[in-house]
Amino acid sequence: MHNSIKNEAHRAIKLSSLVVLSLFAASNVVSLAAPVRHPSKKMLTAHISRQVAQADQLLLNGKYAEAEELYHNALNSNSKDIQARVGYGFALSRGFKLDRAEEELNKALKQDPKNALAHAGKAAVMLNRLQSSNQTIRTSREAYLKQAGAECNQALDCDPNVAEIHATLGNIYLEEKRYDKAQTAFQGAIKLDPKYSDAHAGLGLAKLNLGDTAGAMTSFKEAITENTGNSTAHYGMGLAYLKQNQNDEAIKELNTSLYQNRNSAPVHLALGRAYDAQGNTVAGVKEYQESIRIKPENPSAYLGIANIRENRGDVEHAIAELRSGLELSPNSPELHLRVAQDSLKVEKLDDAIKEYEIVLNSTPRSGAAAEGVTRAYYLKAQKEAAGAFISSNEFEKAKVMINKAVAMNPNSMQLRLAQAKLRALAGEKVDLASVSNPQTDPDRVSYAEALLAQNKFQEASVQMNTVIGNTTNAKDAFAVGDLALMIKDLNSADAAYQKAASFPGSEERAKRGRDMVAKARDDARQNDTLANDLAKRKQLASAVDKYHTAIFDDPRMADARIGLAETLEKLYPNSSKDLRDAAVQINAYMSLTPNLPVKEQEHFQKRVAHLQEKAYKLDQKAVAQNGGKKKVL
């Protein structure tokens, strides 16, 4: 009889007072169900009722409502049963009755201020609150995490040898994306309890975010060995398989996790990615939408749907999806950046510039935003009369932001090349050799764009051809082709799409790309022809507009460049802005026709010098007429 009672006590020690710790950290963390046991030495001297032991077992098995009822009954029998009250608080927390859960845990702490598990339970309640889409809670996220950390520290002061407290602290670090500290905390929990399934799962998530995929999978497998119903571990395994492009295995693990926890936004998000990677875009959109239904303010799901829309060629629809996300997350740099990039694709240059500037204001170091805004200005320079927007306030503002970004991160080649592009567009002489030669393909693309901004077409082609030659799959080749098409580098775009067509299954997509290149060239030719006709009829202003449109469609069209230069020279009265633009167009023409006879080259060079001198004199005359002050355009 004595042995029977002793065995029952040990079973109670193992099961008593389970706590569920739930959190979300972007798209990488799923709800965690972590068993919390009272310290053994205390439990040997404590009386645990059979009802509490049964409730603990129910909580362990995920039957939260039944566990809640049994804990409540135990408290009705003995209102001072602190184990029942702490367990009741945890059960209420798991059912997301968070206010009531906090109330019960506060009662437990009033009864025993040094109850370590009650403090840990309050930390878990605060983490659960962060799952809410309530805007007030979302804006107070840091305060909740700070308070949860304070509760954990109090719990550790009360008893540092409780594994569950260390695991709770690890969950807080995961939420804060302090993955190295999370790893240490979970390792501490496992040291105290080697069979602690959820600590192994948490450790796996930390390792996964630190880039240790193999180590993460080992931890997830250990977690599943200890508890096959650990939804977080299956979710983590799914993410690990996704990282390794093992999509079938990922879907299997994620569906297992979803069966155990159907209301998990991160699991639906990961499933969306897995189906999308398989090419099952209908299922992908469905899972992304379900993730949004559960957690509507999560930017990642909107980005996932936007990817699918873009791949279908419906960029406008993608922008609409992203703007839906911005309604709930108006300060999301990721969403603003993507809207900017997509606006650029559909040639909404002003919208793109506005969105890029929003990103740069909130994230000054963003190389992607700096590169994007200069790309938009480069396209705008081709489309509009030179100088009109370069002297505008928005252009000056962009220069200030990018200069600030370079000052904050002077070793970023991407930022320095963006700065060089803006300076080149403003007519300044830029020595790209001082930036240093690019060593990576993304830097080569940025370098090529900086060369294009200086109308150095041949040098730009060398960089782009190197990037195209380095592509090893259709996806990368299409990415280069799409980017080249966006910046109107039609030769590079066509070459990239041809390279993509060499990969199996990519012929149709490559044909669509090459058709868009052909259309851009045809549009450029039509606009050039129309401009020539308008110029012959002395409709010079209209001709200038059409030449600019032709150059926008195909910046390498030499005939449009020289036609624009000649028309700008004929405008009356002359303006320094138009004369300088004419000089730029002649230089571009010479760059596009490198085999000109020497006499023609000399003629054009003298013509450029004359235009620049004439523009200078007009500026000086304007300054004199303005009382010695430079006129602001």
Image (tube, helix red, strand yellow):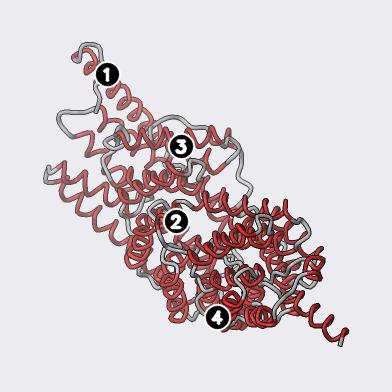
Disc 1 versus disc 4: nearer the observer: 4
User: Residue 214: x percent and y percent?
Assistant: 75, 68
Which residue does the numbered mark 2 point to in the structure image? 137
Which label's residue is closer to the chain start, 1 or 4?
4
Pick the quarter of the image with the C terminus: top left
> Alpha-carbon distance for marks 4 and 3?
61 Å
Q: Secondary structure at mark 2?
A: helix
- Amino acid carrying mark 3 in the image: Ile
User: Residue 580: x percent and y percent?
Assistant: 31, 31
Q: Residue at position x 17%, y 34% from top?
A: 571
Disc 3 versus disc 2: nearer the observer: 2
> Alpha-carbon distance for marks 4 and 2?
29 Å
Disc 1 versus disc 2: nearer the observer: 2
Residue in the foreground of this view, choosing between 268 and 98:
98
Residue 558 horizontal side relative to residue 533, left or right = right
Which residue does the numbered mark 3 point to in the structure image? 402
Which residue does the numbered mark 4 point to in the structure image? 69
**Circle 2: is it few (<14), some (14-19), or many (20+) Cα within 10 Å?**
some
**Circle 4: is it few (<14), some (14-19), or many (20+) Cα within 10 Å?**
some
Which residue does the numbered mark 1 point to in the structure image? 630
Which label's residue is closer to the chain start, 4 or 3?
4
- Amino acid carrying mark 4 in the image: Glu
